[in-house]
Image (cartoon, rainbow, N blue to C red):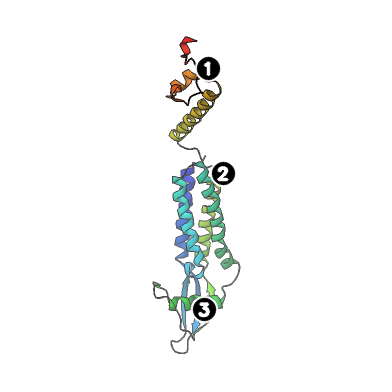
């Protein structure tokens, strides 16, 4: 049986795989430019589908949260990460199922040309156009594999979030016991059993508000 830690680490592995696949070339665009001449420009998966990188970061955050949060939080993180994995797989599926849109390729290359912060991203001039766009299937296939791993891990994390540490459960049991004793003291302030249980739990019945203890303040051994 997989523990929630294994599920979270698998989710992180899927996120890292998706991020790596998004750095690879997904499309090769053949461009025509009257001044610069014709050339072929590679477009990475992150450029072609910017949401791919964002969703990879969401799943990476899910990995960290899956290790840090408690049981209910891990279940919620699993659901969110599963949705992110499904959304991230869409770009790879559409790339493998069809052909890249030359107009979209032109828009991507124009954005790269006008983005001064872009690193190692080639662009085209305003008057250039894309005559053809061919897919490179390696990147999309790897992204789908990474999404499949992330989806499997996310579903596993949501369905089997594990149990909270023993210290947390012990604290919750103690808090529930004290709450029960408070109710019993209010209902039966003269009960010897309740008084002894309260003392055993470090609850001083004599410190309770006036009217909640017996008028004769008898100890359990005097009854």
Q: Residue at x 45, y 54 (%)?
A: 60
Depth check, front residue: 37 or 184: 184
Q: Residues within 10 Å of mark 1 (few under 14, many from 20)?
A: some
Cα distance in 3D space between marks 3 and 2? 43 Å
Instruction: Examine the rendering and report whether any part of residue 94 can be seen.
Output: yes
| Of callouts 3 and 2, the N-terminal one | 3
SS for dot 1: loop
SS for dot 3: helix
| Labels 2, 1: front one | 1
SS for dot 2: helix
Picture disc at residue 106:
3
Picture disc at residue 159:
2
Q: Residues within 10 Å of mark 3 (few under 14, many from 20)?
A: many
Picture layout, residue 44 above or below residue 179? below
Cα distance in 3D space between marks 2 and 1? 45 Å
| Of callouts 3 and 1, the N-terminal one | 3
Instruction: Examine the rendering and report whether any part of residue 138 can be seen.
Output: no
Q: Residues within 10 Å of mark 2 (few under 14, many from 20)?
A: some
Where is residue 177? Give x, y as percent. Answer: 50, 27
The residue wearing badge 1 is: 191
Picture layout, residue 170 above or below residue 3? above
Where is residue 180? Give x, y as percent. Answer: 53, 27
Where is residue 125? Give x, y as percent. Answer: 46, 83
Depth check, front residue: 191 or 211: 211
């Amino acid at each position: 049986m997989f523990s929630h830690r294994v599920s979270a680490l698998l989710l992180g592995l899927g996120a890292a795989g998706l991020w790596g696949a998004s750095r690879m070339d997904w499309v090769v665009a053949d461009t025509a430019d009257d001044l610069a001449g014709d050339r072929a420009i590679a477009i990475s998966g992150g450029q072609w589908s910017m949401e791919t990188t964002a969703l990879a970061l969401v799943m990476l955050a899910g990995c960290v949260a899956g290790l840090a949060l408690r049981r209910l939080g891990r279940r919620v993180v699993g659901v969110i990460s599963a949705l992110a994995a499904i959304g991230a797989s869409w770009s790879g599926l559409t790339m493998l199922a069809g052909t890249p849109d030359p107009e979209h390729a032109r828009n991507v290359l124009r954005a790269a040309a006008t983005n001064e912060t872009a690193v190692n991203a080639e662009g085209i001039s305003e008057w250039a156009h894309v005559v053809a766009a061919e897919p490179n299937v390696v990147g999309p296939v790897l992204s789908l594999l990474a999404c499949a791993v992330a989806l499997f891990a996310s579903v596993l994390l949501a369905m089997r979030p594990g149990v909270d540490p023993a210290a947390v459960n012990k604290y919750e049991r103690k808090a529930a016991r004290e709450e029960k004793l408070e109710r019993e003291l209010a209902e039966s302030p003269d009960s010897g059993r309740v008084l002894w249980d309260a003392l055993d739990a470090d609850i001083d019945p004599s410190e309770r508000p006036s009217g909640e203890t017996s008028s004769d303040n008898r100890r359990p051994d005097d009854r």
